[in-house]
Amino acid sequence: MALNNPLANVLSAINNNERVSHKEVTLKNNSKVIRKVLDILQEQGYVSSFEVIENGRGGELKVLLAGTINKIGVISPNFPVGKSDYQKYEQRYLPARDFGILVVSTSKGMMTHMQAKELGIGGRLIAYCY
């Protein structure tokens, strides 16, 4: 079976393993975008750590879960968001004000929506986590 959105498959696997209280998950998908999203989740405390395991076929990711994720998912389509439009998408994807993060791809790289608001830049929405 072909995978249409590797990031969505990774976030879905993390969400499913978090719900059944597993401490780690091994993912077969590996890309720069997935690793950067995992970096952001690690900075924010949603993931304890992750490592790339080379297997000769592109590598696998071993993610250690922190047990703090309630829900995580990809935002598709990747809506363009201006520097003043973050509140609309916070209300749509996050359960409460200042609870959770939106991952945004900007011209300065991937970051959380809070960092993008501080820098005063817009971008495209990639994922959400709370």
Image: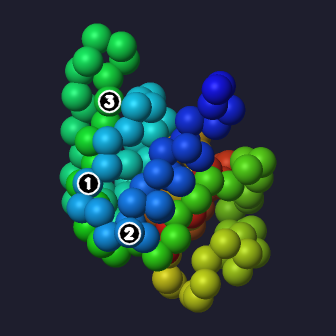
Q: CA distance from mark 2 to mark 3?
A: 21 Å
Q: Is residue 34 left or right of residue 54?
A: right
Q: Which residue is mark 2?
A: 20
Which three-letter amino acid code belongs to the residue tagged 2? Val
Q: Quadrant of the N terminus?
A: top right
User: Which residue is pictured at 22% across the width and 39% down the height?
Assistant: 51
Which three-letter amino acid code belongs to the residue tagged 3? Glu
* Viewer can see residue 22: yes
Q: Is residue 105 left or right of residue 43?
A: right
**Residue most extreme to the bottom:** 96
N-terminal of the two: label 3 or label 1? 1
Q: Which residue is mark 1?
A: 24
User: Which residue is pictured at 73% across the width and 75% down the height?
Assistant: 92
User: Which residue is pictured at 38% across the width and 69% down the height?
Assistant: 20
| SS under mark 2 | loop
What's the image's color scheme? rainbow
Q: Which residue is mark 3?
A: 60
Q: Position of residue 73 (x, y in %)?
A: 58, 59
Mark 2 or mark 3, whichever is nearer to me: 2
N-terminal of the two: label 2 or label 3? 2
Q: Is residue 25 left or right of residue 112?
A: left
Q: CA distance from mark 1 to mark 2?
A: 11 Å
| SS under mark 3 | strand
